[in-house]
Amino acid sequence: MIGPLLVGLFVILMIIGIPIAFVIGIVAMLGIMNVPYIPEVTVPVKMLNGLDSFVLIAVPLFILAANLMNSGQISQKLIDFSLSIVGHIRGGLAHANILVSMLFAGVSGASQADTAGVGKILIPNMKKQGYDKENAVAITAASSTIGVVIPPSIPMIIYAGLTNVSVGALFIVGIIPGVLIGLGMMTLIYMLALKKGYPTYQRASLKNFTKQLIDTIPAMMTPVILIGGIITGIFTATEAAAFASLYTVLIGMFVYKTLKIKDFPRILIDTITLSSLSLFALAAANALGELMSYYQLSAWANQFFTENIDSKWVFLLIIIAFFLFIGTFMDAIPAMILFVPVILPVAITFEIDPILLGIITVITLAVGLVTPPYGLCLLLAAKIGKLSIERSFGAVLPYIAIILVVLFGIAFFPEIAFYLPEKISPDLF
């Protein structure tokens, strides 16, 4: 009886606007209080234990790296370089918006920081050049979702920690889907640009392109070093995050000379604020996971799917639909903490590769970054563009469709995502 009541309480608290981290914590506390054999002290103990992980240190460190990039004006250099590549195409600034998100993704792994840093620069510029508010906001928000698909990726690190799969393998598998999403969005933008007459930039001369390339090389070396180091075993994902932060400090202070000592207090405060949102939700989810274990939800799910579903493709469709729904009101990290341990045994029963399940889970939950009411990237972009959430969401729908096309392609034709990884590093697969 207590189970349905807890579910009802969860829904009511969400409807009245309680933050998801507190909703999870309240439901966990009340649920465990009604279990006779689990003491109430289990909740804070589980919350603390949930954060006592070397892997989780990567979360604030990657967010720190992203904030350092934004403060050190490295984002602007990536934008200038992107414009030198695609600025001459119809709708060049919008194409650059997508491309810079792909480049930014290779450094930080934090979509929200991408939206905030790139959006503050590009959304006002796009509006000045004649782009409508809706598309300026939609392109910025939608392209930010690539940040958790192209490595390094914070959700991938969390998934790897939950399932004991190789972080390096997940990172490599994310490259092709991330690039396909970016190219798909750029194709849509090109068609819109032809229809609406969006402006172009003059084609960059070879001299200008070379200058921009040389100026950007220090920043673009970050993903090469990070991914290469993780794949070869030189350092772990957490050590890679620490290196990314240190490397960004060094190039920001001594190469580009745009990062000042006085900027650090603000950067650290922003990093702590953003990190605490995800980590508190993660801690609360760990406590709720204890309650879910008591009710044996994993065994129940396994029994339900094996008795009622006889196709792994149907199972994948159900998982995609489920995570699309969950992502509308919950961050990817607590969602994975709660539900990946439940669905993973079922996926293995259907002979679904845990790495494939991981990339599907990450991409699906990434859609939640641009779907209300959670939709953090959409909320940030809408605030920067001074546009209502309703109009912003309507404009972002075509870009969500692009993400879903790639997602279903990867789910049903996994060789698309695995082709490059199996060529680069077959030992990981």
Image (tube, rainbow, N blue to C red):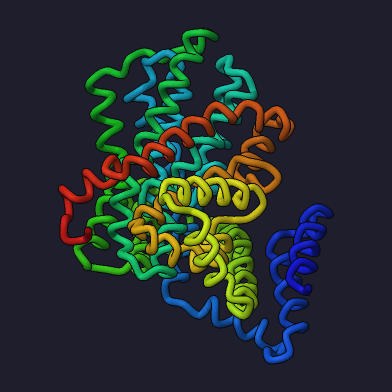
User: In which quadrant of the rendered view does residue 184 lie?
Assistant: top left
- In this rendering, the answer to whether 183 lies above or below 200 is below
The residue sitting at 31% across, 44% down in the picture is 414
Q: Position of residue 386 (x, y in %)?
A: 71, 31
Tally the marks: 0
Of the 4 image quadrants, the one containing the C terminus is bottom left
- In this rendering, the answer to whether 337 lies above or below 197 is below
Is residue 56 visible in the rendered structure shown here? yes
The residue sitting at 57% across, 69% down in the picture is 300
Of the 4 image quadrants, the one containing the N terminus is bottom right
The residue sitting at 67% across, 48% down in the picture is 374
Q: Position of residue 232 (x, y in %)?
A: 19, 63
The residue sitting at 51% across, 8% down in the picture is 195
User: In which quadrant of the rendered view does residue 124 lie?
Assistant: top right
Q: In the figure, is residue 409 to the left or right of 378?
A: left
User: In which quadrant of the rendered view does residue 38 lie?
Assistant: bottom right
126 or 366: which is nearer to us? 366
314 or 287: which is nearer to us? 314
Is residue 245 visible in the rendered structure shown here? no
Q: Position of residue 241 (x, y in %)?
A: 38, 63
- In this rendering, the answer to whether 177 lies above or below 357 is above
304 or 55: which is nearer to us? 304
Q: Position of residue 358 (x, y in %)?
A: 41, 56
Q: In the figure, is residue 271 to the left or right of 148?
A: right
